[in-house]
Amino acid sequence: MKGGTYIFVVLGILLAKALGFCREIVFASVFGASEYTDIYFQIFSLASLVFTGVGSALSTLIIKNLNRPENSSPEAARAYTVYFFKRAFLWCFAAVALLYLFAGPVVRLLLPGISDEAFPTAVKVMYIMLPSCLFIVFAYIMNGVLQNSDVFFITSIMSLPFNVLIISSLFVKDISITAVSVVTTIGWFSHILILLPAFYKRGNRFFVSNGAAAKRSTSVSPEVVYIFIAGMMFQACFMIDKAAVSFDSGAATTLNYASNLFLTISSVFVVSMCNVIYPSVCMSYENNDKERVRKIMRFLITLILCIFLPFILTVCCFGRNIVSLLYEHGEFGPEQTFMMSKLFMIYTFGIFGYVCQEIFNKILYLGGKYRYAVIGTVSVIALKLIADKFLAPYGAVYVAVSTSILFTLYAFCIFLSVRKVVGDYFTAPLLKNVLKVAAAGAGALAVHGLVYALGLCGAAGRFTFLIEILLCSAVYLVLLKVTGVIGYVMDNRSYLDGKKNITEELG
């Protein structure tokens, strides 16, 4: 079935993210929002955001390099993979050692408003979570190698055991934050375990290979640094936001819940697209088939708009209902629901910055245009630090607004920069598709406005908003069908099947 690969990846990531939702909900119910949850989430961010940022950069780079002509044979590809693992291990080991040495100052940097009483606990949690760096980096490199071999489903569910372990631990009576931190580190190691059978089945190894072949491979260090920096915009800005409000007990946790909810939902589709499409884009670019790359990008932009316009509208219209339904249990009360729903909506407006970071940046890497993504990322982070310095005293809402504005500006700049790599991809047919999707969104919004004006939904019960969402969704899909957008997506869905269609055409 054409496009079936993408559907299976979406289902896999949806399953993993659903468990991630459960993890967040159970955690909120057990611990609520306090200084100690701020400690856990901010140090957890070092692993879940910074370390995964490194891993994602390495995954992107190994896919790019495995598609080079010198690594086209299976033997050369395996030799390069081993070389890659060796270099990654050495750099990560050195980084972890440094972090152990400077754990105290790093904690002060992550949590500038932490009390002296809670500081020893924060350092202890830091020590416990640092080994995650090695586990995460190895798992993400394995992830990239498998995706390049068109192995997508197992990579999409690699976080399942991680979430199961943490959720299970939260049901232990009177469990402490430090105990949850231990389970979290073990959970990161489980990413490697779930990928290991598929990785070894395809003849890959970690440290054993033909030395001569590996030595001929190019150095990975400079490109990794560029990709890591360019891929850290969202992660760094969210950490800066949480650090900026750490003086207000529980505020960092509320920001964490909001940003995680945003990333959890949006990443289901963004990560799926990136995983499935990026290897085929790499192969097309290395074969000098830029016209195919432009076609893929036009298809991508249309599909992204089809998915994320209703996402934005849903969060704007029903965000509070969604947060209340998912999070308002136990220690998480109405006041926190109100604040989290506002932050969730604000962050959602930065969705296209996230899309550019995860997908469009990688197009720039193919042409060696790292500087555009790096300069843009560094500029956003610098402006974020300055903005939070002035806005933090006014509260988390103002901090989040500045983040979304910067993300949107970044998206606009990267959108223009990609033309330097693939040429002019924004054509008249693409503009027509954009306008058609916008019209469908306007139609769905009009239905919501009509229902609201007539007072037909909202007072009957906690779940009635779901009926309105279904009604608006039906109108949106009908309009997409009538305008021909769904037909366009279906006609080009083979782009969502990885490299196999290109390989079949060439072979």
Image: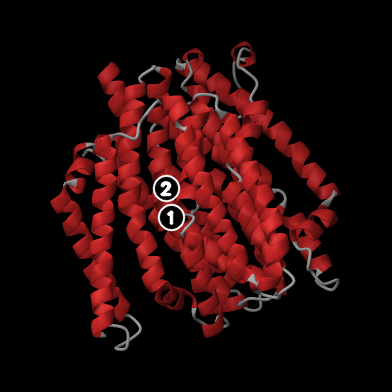
67 and 425: which one is in front?
425
Say which residue appears at 69% left-offset and 48% top-offset: 382
295 and 376: which one is in front?
376
Indicate whether 324 appears above or below 378.
Answer: below
Quadrant of the image containing the C terminus: top left
In this view, the residue farthest toward the bottom is: 460
Q: CA distance from mark 1 to mark 2?
A: 6 Å
**Which element type, helix, strand or loop, lies under badge 2?**
helix
Indicate the amino acid at tag 2.
Val
Say which residue appears at 66% left-offset and 78% top-offset: 174
Indicate whether 193 appears above or below 264.
Answer: above
In-image side of 105 versus 218 (left or right)? right
Please say whether residue 136 is visible from this viewpoint. Answer: no
330 and 350: which one is in front?
350
In-image side of 47 versus 139 (left or right)? right
Image mark for residue 270: 2
The percent coordinates of residue 401 (x first, y second) are 56, 63
Quadrant of the image containing the N terminus: top left
Indicate whether 376 appears above or below 341.
Answer: above
The percent coordinates of residue 61 (x first, y second) are 55, 30
89 and 279: which one is in front?
279
Q: Which residue is mark 1?
A: 266
- Label 1: how many Cα within 10 Å (few below 14, some 14–19, many 20+): some
The percent coordinates of residue 461 (x first, y second) are 32, 87
- Count numbered badges in the picture: 2
Indicate the amino acid at tag 1.
Ser
Indicate whether 24 appears above or below 407.
Answer: below
Say which residue appears at 77% left-offset and 64% top-offset: 122
**Which element type, helix, strand or loop, lies under badge 1?**
helix
* Contact? badges 1 and 2 (CB < 8 Å): yes
